[in-house]
Image (spheres, rainbow, N blue to C red):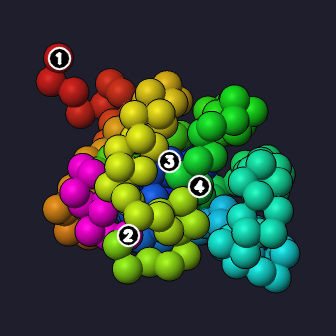
Amino acid sequence: MPAMEKLAGNFFLVGLMGAGKTTVGRALARRTGKTFYDSDQEIEARTGVRVATIFDIEGEQRFRNRESCVIRDLAQQRDIVLATGGGAVLREENRWVLASHGTVIYLRATIDDLLLRTQHDKNRPLLQIADPRGKLESLFNERDPLYREIADIVVDTTQQNVNLLVSHLIEQLYAYQHPRQGSSE
């Protein structure tokens, strides 16, 4: 397995809610010796209220303003793993900040997996509706091209053990950062 110190820079995780950004991000940070941040948790720490409350009181656009500020601030740090909110890629400014300040990893999962992982979570304001499957499908169709646009690495998180997934991701990151080493070409 590649040595920890050989994985330089920031790692930014993007993907839909329920794709595993926070879970994988924490494990990746632990395994690479980096500091972990979750943009939604950082917003909650700065405001003192839950994301769902911000959505209710201020609306999605004001929330997105806060999110952009947090992403911009955190991206300036060194050696972090940042799990972004699922909608962070909607703003071109966020896509540029992420793509220019680190390695972007798109965690991708099937709609069925996303639905299973989010069905009991009341802290997902966009899914507190009658048809969460339809909403996830709509979000996927809207956001998948944006995730792919900035992703350096795409990882399928469907039905995968977190430790195995992170081990595989570390190998991909190593290959991405050291493209010629270990190649049999």
Q: Judge whether 86 appears above or below 33 on screen.
A: above
Residue mark closest to the camera, 1 vs 2: 2
Of residue 149 and residue 48, the one placed in the foreground of this image is 48
Image-based side of 123 in relation to 94, left or right: left
- Pointers 2 and 4 in contact (C-beta within 8 Å): no
Give how far apart the Cα atoms at labels 1 and 2 are.
Answer: 42 Å
**Foreground residue among 47 and 55:** 55
Residue 130, position in %: x, y? Answer: 41, 64
Q: Residue at x 82, y 62 (%)?
A: 58
Q: Are marks 1 and 2 in contact (CB under 8 Å)?
A: no
Classify mark 2: helix, strand or loop: helix
Q: Is residue 114 left or right of residue 60?
A: left
Residue 84 disc label: 4
In primary-sequence order, the first of circles 4 and 1 is 4
Residue 118 image label: 2
Check disc 3 and report the residue beneath it. 14
Q: Could you classify mark 4 by the number of other residues whose Cα lies within 10 Å: few (under 14), some (14-19), or many (20 or more)?
A: many
Residue 153 at least partly seen? no
Tell me whether circle 3 and circle 4 mark residues in contact (CB < 8 Å).
yes
Highlighted range, magenta: 110-118
Residue 75 at x, y percent in the picture: 73, 49
Label 1 sits on a secondary structure element that is: loop
Nearer to us in this view, 71 or 168: 71
Q: In terms of secondary structure, where does tag 4 sit?
A: loop
- Of pointers 3 and 4, the one earlier in the residue sequence: 3
